[in-house]
Image (cartoon, rainbow, N blue to C red):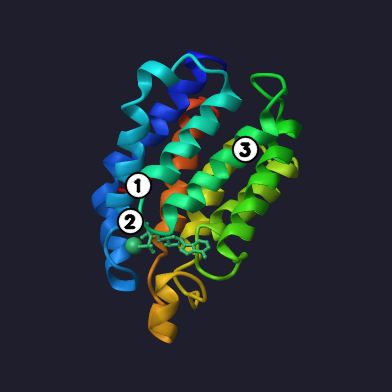
């Protein structure tokens, strides 16, 4: 997973966001401003455009540079939040084995999720991307087989549908936010499923 291996993972995640941009934008229409897919696509394309300078970097540095790119190019709440996730993940993995073992990855991911919570002043249960990232961290830190993580994150994203949004634009709608899947939860789940597939760690179905 080092060098070009890490870059292949970034390419896979970016490709998935670009392929699902319309779907993510549609999800953001009823409970946001209809730009989530556009935002994520812009960030993904900006990272891919840096292939020449990023592709050979070790994982920690690659995550750092990718996070910086998202913070700088993505407007909206999601850019700084995903940017923070990658920046903090890069920081936590600095000096660790590349690729990291599972325990190291789980601890680093926990640190990154904590940074997203601090940045968004948010936590699980508020109908955001944290409703996918927090359960994912719990599953990573526990001893859940990797093959179960794809279905887990897809279900976690679906579980935001009945939630009342209390953070982000969707919270402006109050009770009317109920009954819609959160776009950030969906983009998180899509990225995780794609990364798992890229790692060949068990099948996980991405619903169209
Ligand atoms: P914006 O809301 O600024 O238009 P996007 O549409 O790109 O930005 O992203 C919206 C997503 O960002 C939401 O679906 C939600 O998952 C996430 N989000 C928004 N605010 C927060 C927050 N404070 N904490 C965590 N996630 C948030
Ligand atoms: Mg939006």
User: In which quadrant of the rendered view does residue 26 lie?
Assistant: bottom left
The residue under the point 60% across, 27% down is 60
Q: Mark 1 points at which residue?
A: 40
Q: Do the residues labelled 2 and 1 touch (CB within 8 Å)?
A: yes
Q: Quadrant of ligand 2?
A: bottom left
Q: Which mark is residue 89?
A: 3
Determine whether 42 is above or below 28 in the image. Answer: above
Q: Does the residue labelled 3 lie within 8 Å of ligand 1?
A: no
Rendered image: mark on residue 36 = 2
Residue 189 picture location, percent across and down: 47, 48
Q: Nearer the viewer, residue 15 or 92?
A: 92
Residue 104 lies, in percent from the top left, at 74, 32
Name which quarter of the figure residue 87 lies in: top right
Q: Which mark identifies residue 153?
A: none
Spatial CA span between label 2 and label 3: 22 Å
Ligand 1 neighbours mark 1 (CB distance < 8 Å): yes
Q: Is residue 151 left or right of residue 124?
A: left
Q: From where the camera sits, is residue 204 visible?
A: no
Determine if the C-beta at disc 2 is less than 8 A from ligand 1.
yes
């Amino acid at each position: 997973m080092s060098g070009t291996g890490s870059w292949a993972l970034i390419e896979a995640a970016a490709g998935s966001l670009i392929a699902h941009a319309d779907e993510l934008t549609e999800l953001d229409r009823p409970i946001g401003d209809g730009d989530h897919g556009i935002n994520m696509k812009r960030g993904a394309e900006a990272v891919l455009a840096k292939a020449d300078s990023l592709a050979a970097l070790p994982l920690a540095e690659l995550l750092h540079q990718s996070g910086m790119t998202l913070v700088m190019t993505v407007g909206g709440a999601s850019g700084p939040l995903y940017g923070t996730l990658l920046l903090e993940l890069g920081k936590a993995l600095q000096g660790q084995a590349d690729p990291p073992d599972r325990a190291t990855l789980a601890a680093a991911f926990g640190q990154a999720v904590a940074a997203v919570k601090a940045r968004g002043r948010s936590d699980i249960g508020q109908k955001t991307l944290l409703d996918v990232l927090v359960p994912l961290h719990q599953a990573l830190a526990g001893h859940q087989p990797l093959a179960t993580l794809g279905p887990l994150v897809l279900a976690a994203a679906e579980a935001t549908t009945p939630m009342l949004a209390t953070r982000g634009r969707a919270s402006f709608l109050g009770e009317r936010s109920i009954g819609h899947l959160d776009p950030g939860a969906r983009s998180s789940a899509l990225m995780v499923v794609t990364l798992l597939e890229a790692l060949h760690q068990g099948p996980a179905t991405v619903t169209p």
